[in-house]
Image: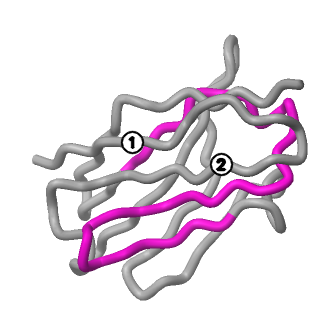
Amino acid sequence: QAQLVESGGGLAQPGGSLRLSCSCSRIIDSFGTVMAWYRQAPGKSRDLVAEIRRLGSTDYADSVKGRFTISKDNAKNTVYLQMNDLIPEDTAVYYCNARFGSSSYWGQGTQVTVSS
């Protein structure tokens, strides 16, 4: 089992920045662990935003490349998503996901709204 708790969402203006955090109850620096952020806008599917693997390699959705950065602090079992140059299309509920081998866990989600 693993519990994930997200924080850091809120309202930002276009061009602004937000930093999301995801604290995990399990050790994330373990073999086969992948930590990720997904997002789901109203009426749309939940899509992958970014993921980071144990040794630090990352992948990003094309829509956020160059604007978002995923990182992790193994000592704190925490994953971050730094979001810069926000646009209205980034508005969504952002979910943290942890995969430990074949097991997958989700956080409760945090709302991000980009609006002037």
* Residue 73: image tag: none
Quadrant where the C terminus sits is top right
Q: Nearer the viewer, residue 52 or 75?
A: 75
In the rendered image, which quarter is residue 40 located in?
A: top right
Q: CA distance from mark 1 to mark 2?
A: 13 Å
The residue depicted at 10 percent of the width and 47 percent of the height is 1
Q: Residues within 10 Å of mark 2 (few under 14, many from 20)?
A: some
The vertical placement of 29 against 110, above or below, is below
Query: Secondary structure beneath disc 2?
Result: strand
**Residue 62 counted in the magenta span:** no
Label 2, on which residue? 18
The type of residue carrying mark 1 is: Glu
The residue depicted at 48 percent of the width and 56 percent of the height is 36
User: Magenta part of the protein: which range?
Assistant: 69-97
Tell whether 116 sits left or right of 23.
right
* Residue 6: image tag: 1
**Residue 93 counted in the magenta span:** yes
